Amino acid sequence: MSQEKQKKQAKELPFAWHWQETLIAGQPRPLAVASDPDAMLIDACKRQDEGETGVIDPFWATTWRAASGIDRFMDRLELADRRVLEVGCGTGHAGMAAAARGAQVTLTDGVEDPLHLVRMSLERNSLQARVRLLRLGQDRIEGERFDVILGSDVTYLRELWTQLLDCFEEQLTQEGVALLSDPMRLIANEFCDWIKQKPWQTTVHSISMDDDPDHPIRVIELRR
């Protein structure tokens, strides 16, 4: 995307946004984020209450701590030239962290609004990655499989669990790994119990974080 087109697109976004310095792959980098995610969520709830259809809660508008946890976990992996897919990328922190480590990254989300921010962040940080719409349960990336699939805080809805596994079955290489992170949510505890009944090898890691050592991030590692 050209710089002029990107600037025009940024001005046309239906929400306020700003640059937020964020530690990504060990370096402070500017990340395009929504300026008032709480107001966006309140507005979405109001529209839903008024009967408007097709309104999606903008949970993508916040950069969750889980993204920082999966970023730190990736220090343990060799990602150079590996094919990486991020699902539900939101602001794109995790996928950008993989790209900064030399991976060939595809960042996806189920709605378009966060993808505009992701494109701007990639451009600002001189990182290369593909960005595209991918609605779990509806879309797939035909003819492609990935060595690593990332999902930061994507286990908060039970109806997503089967869709996530279907995505892994379709898009992960035979020797690949899926990494799902969350801040020890109760719903993710249920996910851990649920996934252990499926034909996936499951390893759970606890990642200590500098910003709040008493509240680590959980990373669930899944292999076939």
Image: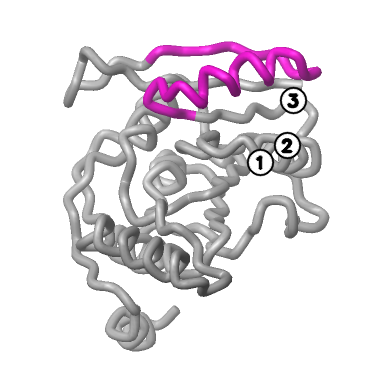
- Element type where label 3 sits in the image: strand
- Tell me, yes or no, whether the two marked residues, 1 and 3, touch with CB atoms within 8 Å: no
Q: Give the amino acid type for the residue marked by disc 3 in the picture.
A: Glu
Give the numbered dot on residue 60.
none
Does 15 sit left or right of 140 as displayed? left
10 Å neighbourhood of mark 3: few (<14), some, or many (≥20)?
few
- Tell me, yes or no, whether the two marked residues, 1 and 2, touch with CB atoms within 8 Å: yes
Does 164 sit left or right of 190 as displayed? right
Quarter occupied by the N terminus: bottom left
Q: Residue at x 22, y 13 (%)?
A: 214
* Location of mark 2 (residue): 162
Q: Which residue lies furthest to the front in this view?
A: 50
* Location of mark 3 (residue): 175
- Element type where label 2 sits in the image: helix
Percent coordinates x, y for residue 27 in the rendering: 22, 40
Give the numbered dot on residue 159.
1
- In the image, the segment drawn in magenta is 181-206
